[in-house]
Image (cartoon, grey):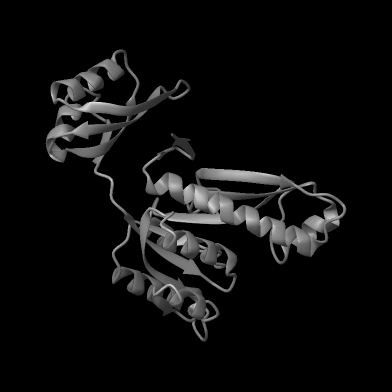
Amino acid sequence: MKEARVLIDCSDEKGLVYKISKVFYEMGLNIDKNQEFVDEQTNKFFMRTKVSGIFEVDTLQNAIKAVVPLEAHVRVIVPAKKRIVLLATKESHALGDILIRWEAGELNAQIEAVIANHKDLKALTRRFDIPFIHVSTEGIDRHEHEKRMIEVLGELSFDYIVLAKYMRILSDNFVKRFEWKIINIHHSFLPAFIGANPYKQAYERGVKIIGATAHFVTSDLDEGPIISQDVIAVNHNYSWQDMQSAGRDVEKIVLSRALHLVLNDRVFIHQNRTIVF
């Protein structure tokens, strides 16, 4: 007896849920949980089902493919800890929160390594007995640094790269090499502020909302499909330092939530959106 997560996305057509459920029934599988959604604007069908029973992954996957449209993307995933690599710079709040959740057993992942372009977070990482790899930026341009990063990543086995406040812009070449495998967290302000010290800029504009956004990384800076977001209210009593502290708390929560969703196969990417079950 084992469990599987069955993920299906395809063009919508009449009777899909019936046909897929019939496959599970005929194979003697129990449907433990089922969720589906149809994007009516694009006529796209999404389904995530948890099943249990006795089965072979390839047999189940082929049986489903036989009853859904030809272009369907079908994945049968037996739950297991996914492997992640964390990229960091100097800020410790996002990295520290992930490491603590991992040690407490709250993160359904195996952390393969922390890679950083500064040594500031080496001691923090080593406390958790996780490899820390320093890839310095000193004396080299971005192209050479990314080349060295790709070489290091090439020696590791992983499912996702998590940018735990990795404060460097990634090139198109880097992003495309690891397409849909990079997850980022950044602040979210209304209006948005970019550049140095966004919290000070926000304070000077009197913002009333601080938030954070976790998303997949694409070639368009900070515009990839959004996985999770949250906001908190602030007021005139907050200094920019208070805003920064509050913002970091939101970033930690949002990144943790996004990782939980991705690591448990709850996220479908559709165009520049996500469908989250």
User: Residue 229, image x and y in percent?
Assistant: 59, 44
Please name the residue shown 41% across and 57% down the image: 105
Q: Is residue 132 above or below residue 220?
A: below
Residue furthest out toward the front: 104
User: Residue 260, image x and y in percent?
Assistant: 44, 48
| Of the pair 10 and 17, the residue shown nearer to us | 17
Q: Is residue 172 visible?
A: no
Quadrant showing the N terminus: top left
Q: Is residue 141 above or below residue 207?
A: below
Q: Quarter of the image holding residue 202?
A: bottom right
User: Residue 234, image x and y in percent?
Assistant: 79, 49
| Of the pair 114 and 226, the residue shown nearer to us | 114
Q: Quarter of the image holding residue 50?
A: top left
| Of the pair 250 and 170, the residue shown nearer to us | 250
Q: Is residue 133 above or below residue 34?
A: below
Quadrant showing the C terminus: top left
| Of the pair 192 and 220, the residue shown nearer to us | 192
Please name the residue shown 54% across and 72% down the image: 89
From the viewer's perspective, tell me whether residue 64 is left or right of residue 144.
left
